[in-house]
Image (tube, grey):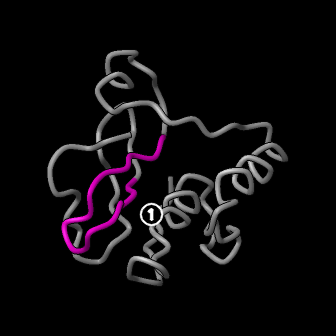
């Protein structure tokens, strides 16, 4: 994992999710497609399919109970805006927040 920080901020423009993917794939954020709009999930799945991967969402507590190992993305409520924020996790622990202020979530992680 190579920490990559987000380069865009705000509810509509923010790219924390793409920064998390770039961190996990150890590439530049510009190498990650932008996943926005109503088709973001299917676009993400199509992109991951080319890497023989698949994105699933699991409730955070359930994920930890399953003892799944490796890198993953953790989502929760942003401490700055009324929206979701994404960070990188490893073995169910938050290890990299792509936002410069490094504050993880308001409350508990969601997925």
> Compared to 101, does 70 lie above or below?
above
Q: Residue furthest top?
A: 66
Q: Is residue 77 magenta?
A: yes
Image quadrant where residue 108 sits: top left
Residue 14 at what x, y percent from top left? 45, 77
Residue 72 vs residue 36, the one in the foreground = 36
Is 70 or 47 nearer to us in this picture? Answer: 47
In the rendered structure, the answer to whether residue 28 lies left or right of residue 82 reads: right
Q: With respect to residue 47, does 64 lie above or below?
A: above
Depicted 100 relative to depicted 107: above or below: below
Q: Residue at x 21, y 57 (%)?
A: 105
Secondary-structure class at tag 1: loop
- Is residue 109 rendered magenta in the image? no
Residue 67 point in image, percent of width and height: 38, 17
* Residue drawn at 27 percent across, 44 percent down: 109
Horizontally, is 21 left or right of 9 in the view?
A: right
Q: Does the magenta stretch mainly form a helix, a strand or a loop?
A: strand
**Residue linked to disc 1:** 3
Residue sticking out furthest to the right: 50
Q: Quadrant of the C terminus?
A: top left
Q: Which residues are magenta?
A: 72-87
Residue 60 on image: x %, y %: 33, 33
Q: Can you name the residue that lies furthest to the front here?
A: 38
Q: Residue at x 39, y 25 (%)?
A: 63
- Quarter-wise, where is residue 35 in the image? bottom right
């Amino acid at each position: 994992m190579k920490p990559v920080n987000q380069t865009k901020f705000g509810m509509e423009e923010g790219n924390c999710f793409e920064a998390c993917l770039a961190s996990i794939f150890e590439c530049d954020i510009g190498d990650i497609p932008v996943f926005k709009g109503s088709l973001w999930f299917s676009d993400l799945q199509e992109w991951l399919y080319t890497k023989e991967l698949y994105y699933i969402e699991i409730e955070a507590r359930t994920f930890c109970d399953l003892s799944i190992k490796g890198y993953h993305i953790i989502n929760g409520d942003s401490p700055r805006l009324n929206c979701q924020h994404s960070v990188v996790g490893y073995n169910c622990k938050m290890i990299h927040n792509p936002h410069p202020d490094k504050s993880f979530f308001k409350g508990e992680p969601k997925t």
